[in-house]
Amino acid sequence: MPTIPNEKTKIFGLNRIDKKQKILVVEGPIDSLFLKNAIATADSNLMVAEEFSDKNNLILIPDNEPRNNSIVNQIKKFINSGFSVCLFPENFPGKDINEAVIRGMTKPEIMRIIDQNTFSGLRAEIEFNRWKKV
């Protein structure tokens, strides 16, 4: 059974992850249930996961909201801090994993999109500038 976020950590799903594999970090606990080796922060500050694993072992997957200033600013911080970040393509059917599943995407399709749209470093900056709409 997944863990419930507590006041101290606010991390959902720590008991389900294998720290030897890449860890996917999302905002919503429900989103994390659709992904292999995923945790949720229960807010947009996905970097808090670094408290539990090295940043090189994390893939941050923020909500797909390129017009939301708060999300855009958070993603810029993620990239500037050296994290790998997934930036969903324009045709992604929803603002998060849960919405994509509701709209018919399968778990393997979502994982393929994450794999193909995860970037770091200079490439992340370039893709981020294409992705954001603010």
Image: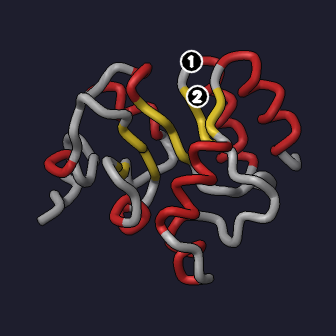
Callout 2 secondary element: helix
- The correct choice, above or below, for 110 with respect to 15 in the image is below
In the rendered image, residue 25, in percent from the top left (x then y), is placed at: 42, 44
In the rendered image, residue 19, in percent from the top left (x then y), is placed at: 23, 32
Callout 1 secondary element: loop
- The correct choice, above or below, for 1 with respect to 16 in the image is below
Q: Residue at x 23, y 53 (%)?
A: 13
Residue tagged 1: 81
- Callouts 2 and 1 close, C-beta under 8 Å: yes
In the rendered image, residue 134, in percent from the top left (x then y), is placed at: 87, 46
Residue tagged 2: 78
Q: Which of the two residues, 96 or 16, is positioned nearer the viewer here?
A: 16
Q: Residue at x 43, y 20 (%)?
A: 56
> In screen coordinates, is 38 left or right of 76?
left
| Pointer 1 local density, CA inside 10 Å: few below 14, some 14–19, many at least 20 | few
Q: Quadrant of residue 90?
A: bottom right
Task: Quote the CA–CA distance across marks 2 and 1.
Answer: 5 Å
Q: Residue at x 38, y 26 (%)?
A: 57
Kind of residue sitting beneath label 2: Phe
Q: Residue at x 79, y 64 (%)?
A: 91
Q: Quadrant of the N terminus?
A: bottom left
| Pointer 2 local density, CA inside 10 Å: few below 14, some 14–19, many at least 20 | many
In the rendered image, residue 121, in percent from the top left (x then y), is placed at: 67, 17
Kind of residue sitting beneath label 1: Ser
